[in-house]
Amino acid sequence: MLPHFRPFALLFLVLAVPLGLWLLLDGSGRADSVRLSGRTLTESGEPLGGVILTARGLSPIGNGHGEGEAHTTQSDEDGMFDLSGLPPGMIELLATHDGFMETSLEVGPIADGGGLQGVELVLASRSLARISGMLGSSVSDIAGREVWMVSLDNREGDRTRTDKGGRFQFIDLVPGKYGLWLKPKDKNQGRFGFRDGASAPESPVVELHGGDVCHVVLEGR
């Protein structure tokens, strides 16, 4: 009677092999075999350890992206990290660390079975900066003068007035580029300030990093 069971055994093999391969994949017919490695750095280029890195596969859905399963690791004391078992295609990397601003990076597309080495993520310090300044010799009346400040990154601004010695400051500033200028004392001198990120020659532009204290001398009328 054994010969009568051979067709059934053959049918079992035909069905079992594809099913086994399907289970070895991710259930959708796609292997998770992509590997990413690299390092995390500070703005000064120093290795930054203890960074939490989360990687997700980005699958095209319409005009947007669909997020896949998250894979997480942590960079070592030298800032090195290694992520494996990722899906092929575009991959988003998210890096977080206490005291630093969150940063993200999209890499790819990466083919199935491939990988990418030398990925670098630079994290900016959350430390706030400060601009401290005084009016220069070209300014006749220095007390109570209005000083303007604008972020060239997001166009947000602020203003303050000088003390009796012509000194002023702006505190709790996030890293970025800022423009400064002195409001003309004579209102008939017309408009003043920035247009499209440009400044007058006497209006300095400063670039701040986390924890910076920038000292400036502001000229004007």
Image (spheres, rainbow, N blue to C red):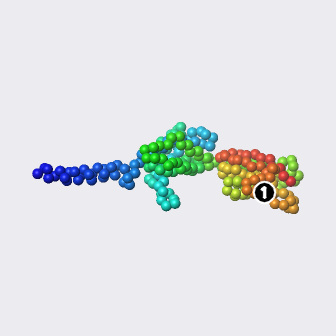
Is residue 94 in view? no
Q: For residue 161, what is the image quadrant?
A: bottom right
**75 up-or-down from 153: above or below:** above
Q: Nearer the viewer, residue 33 or 136?
A: 33
Q: Position of residue 93 (x, y in %)?
A: 52, 49
56 left or right of 194 in image: left
- Kindly identify the residue that appears in the image at 37 percent across and 50 percent down: 25
**Viewer can see residue 41:** yes
Q: Residues within 10 Å of mark 1 (few under 14, many from 20)?
A: some
Q: Residue furthest left?
A: 1
What is the number of callouts on the image?
Answer: 1
| Secondary structure state at the residue bearing disc 1 | loop
Which quadrant of the rendered structure holds the C terminus? bottom right
Q: At which x and y percent is residue 45?
A: 61, 40
- What residue appears at the point 44 percent right and 53 percent down from the top-left corner? 69
Give percent across and percent down for residue 11: 23, 53
**Residue drawn 81% across the image and 50% down it:** 202
Position of residue 10 relative to residue 49, above or below, is below
- Say which residue label 1 marks: 193
Check the image and name the residue furthest to the top: 78
The amino acid type, in three-letter code, at marker 1 is: Gly
Q: Nearer the viewer, residue 26 or 80?
A: 26
In the rendered structure, the answer to whether residue 146 lies left or right of residue 52 reads right
From the top left corner, tell me how far across and down residue 57 is, in percent: 47, 52
